[in-house]
Amino acid sequence: MSGVPCVFPFKHRGVVYHGCTSSDDPDKKLWCSTNVTAAGEHIVGSGYWGHCNMDGGYCPYVETFSQCTTRPGASGECKPVALCVGISSAEEEENECEISQGRIGVCCADRLDSGVTIEIPGFKFENVPVKDVTDEDVNKFIGSR
């Protein structure tokens, strides 16, 4: 639908989008929902969607990541390697996935396990257990130094 503003957030096939997505578009173009149910579900089959007009500001792009499962069986998201904290090069190779449009990423576990070693030049950690620490927690810690 041309010129119709997007409705955010919208839910499509179990994923909540807060911005345009290329998911399920055969040409991998960014699109958004223009009408949703009371529960926020995109209304499928009625033409209530449109390709995003990046120039007109109708549909801001927000990167969304698909769900995946790591080789050891942990749930996670397929995202750029730079956003996956605490992953080794071996894990990176084992858990390669496609983000979108042929871009390669890595399946990042939702939580770090207790076997992760965090090394920051100039800091020394001895026997510090890492348990139930999220990527966000690590990023906040590193960013505060």
Image (tube, helix red, strand yellow):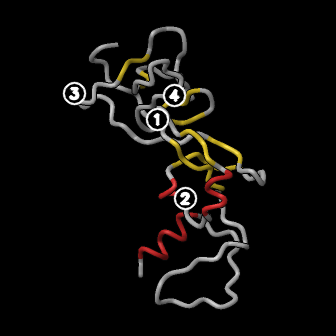
The mark that comes first in sequence, 3 or 2, is 3
The mark that comes first in sequence, 4 or 2, is 4
Q: How crowded is mark 1: few (under 14 residues within 10 Å), some or many (20 or more)?
A: some
| Left or right, 79 with reference to 3 | right
Q: Give the distance between the C-alpha atoms of the residues marked 1 and 4, in whole angstroms.
A: 15 Å
> x, y (%) of residue 15?
58, 35
Query: Residue at label 1?
Result: 9
Q: Label for residue 31?
A: none
Please say if 118 is above or below 12: below
| Left or right, 20 with reference to 127 | left
Query: Residue at label 2?
Result: 84
> x, y (%) of residue 73?
78, 51
> x, y (%) of residue 42?
52, 22
Query: Residue at label 4?
Result: 23
Residue in the picture at 60% in, 89% down: 125
Residue situated in front as seen by the camera: 143 or 86: 86
Q: Quadrant of residue 48?
A: top left
Q: Give the distance between the C-alpha atoms of the residues marked 1 and 2, in whole angstroms.
A: 25 Å
Q: How crowded is mark 2: few (under 14 residues within 10 Å), some or many (20 or more)?
A: many
Check if mark 1's residue and mark 4's residue have beta carbons within 8 Å: no
Q: From the image, state whether disc 4 or disc 2 is nearer to you.
A: 2
Please say if 127 is above or below 94: below
Query: Residue at label 3?
Result: 56
